[in-house]
Image: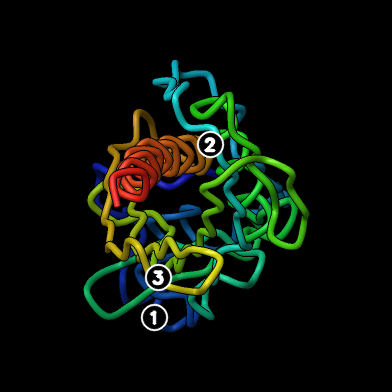
Amino acid sequence: MTFTHTRRPTCPVRFLAAAGLGLCMSMLVGCAGQSIDESRYTLPSETQNVDVASDFKGSVSLAPPRMASYLKDDGIVMQLDDIRIHQARHHLWAEPLDRQLQERMRQHLSQALPNADVLRSGQSSEASTPALHVQLDVDRFQGRDDGMAVVDGQWRIRDDNDRTLSRESFEIERPLEDDGYPALVRALGSAWDTLGDRLVDALVEVADAAETN
């Protein structure tokens, strides 16, 4: 079953309200009463070309993202309006979302910084300085009822002495190319890759500033 991001729901609203499902069910899975198979999703493999910053030769330690509490469950999230969200019961992440996001970001940074050691937090590195530590806070990682995938939150880059070198908020939107959860998951993956590009630029900028000081 799929949701449609451009068409209004066809099920009577009063019927959905009586069934306790609400507007979100009509958007995401169609009319009540239809059987739904459970599907599980992983973020897609990165296929886009990554800009390479070969001059960066230090280490980057990437902590697991800190997720908003409603993003910690398995269900993929749709934002219905400014105050309501819906968490899918039958369209689920195949493994914890924070783990997927950490690994995808680590792979992205590794491609973009080929001469750096990009590690999960807690791993040791013998790379030369700078040694930078990245913490990502994710407040939204979800679809929206206007057909957009939305990722927002904040990053913090710090040094070995826990001094904050860069702190920045991010908000990234990507349109869905089709209806349904597969298109949403792909759009969310693309938005996360865009965040990776911005984070690479910030890491290079921080490293350059450290060399000049």
Distance from label 1 to label 2 (Cα)?
46 Å
Image point 44% across, 37% down: which residue? 193
Neighbour class for label 1 at 10 Å: few (<14), some, many (≥20)? few
In the structure shown, which secondary structural element does the residue marked by tag 2 occupy? helix
- Dot 2 or dot 3: first in sequence order is 2
Vertical order, 163 against 109 (above or below):
below
| Residue annotated with mark 2 | 109
Image point 49% across, 79% down: which residue? 19
Question: Do labels 1 and 3 touch, CB within 8 Å?
Answer: no
On-image quarter of the N terminus:
top right
Vertical order, 43 against 28 (above or below):
above
Find the residue positioned furthest to the front.
213
Neighbour class for label 3 at 10 Å: few (<14), some, many (≥20)? some
Question: Do labels 2 and 3 touch, CB within 8 Å?
Answer: no
Which three-letter amino acid code belongs to the residue tagged 2? Answer: Leu
Neighbour class for label 2 at 10 Å: few (<14), some, many (≥20)? many
| Residue annotated with mark 1 | 17
Residue closer to the observer: 33 or 95:
95
Which three-letter amino acid code belongs to the residue tagged 1? Answer: Ala
- Where residue 120 sits: x, y (%)? 70, 53
| Residue annotated with mark 3 | 139
Image point 39% across, 62% down: which residue? 155
Question: Is residue 40 left or right of 141 when viewed as pictured?
Answer: right
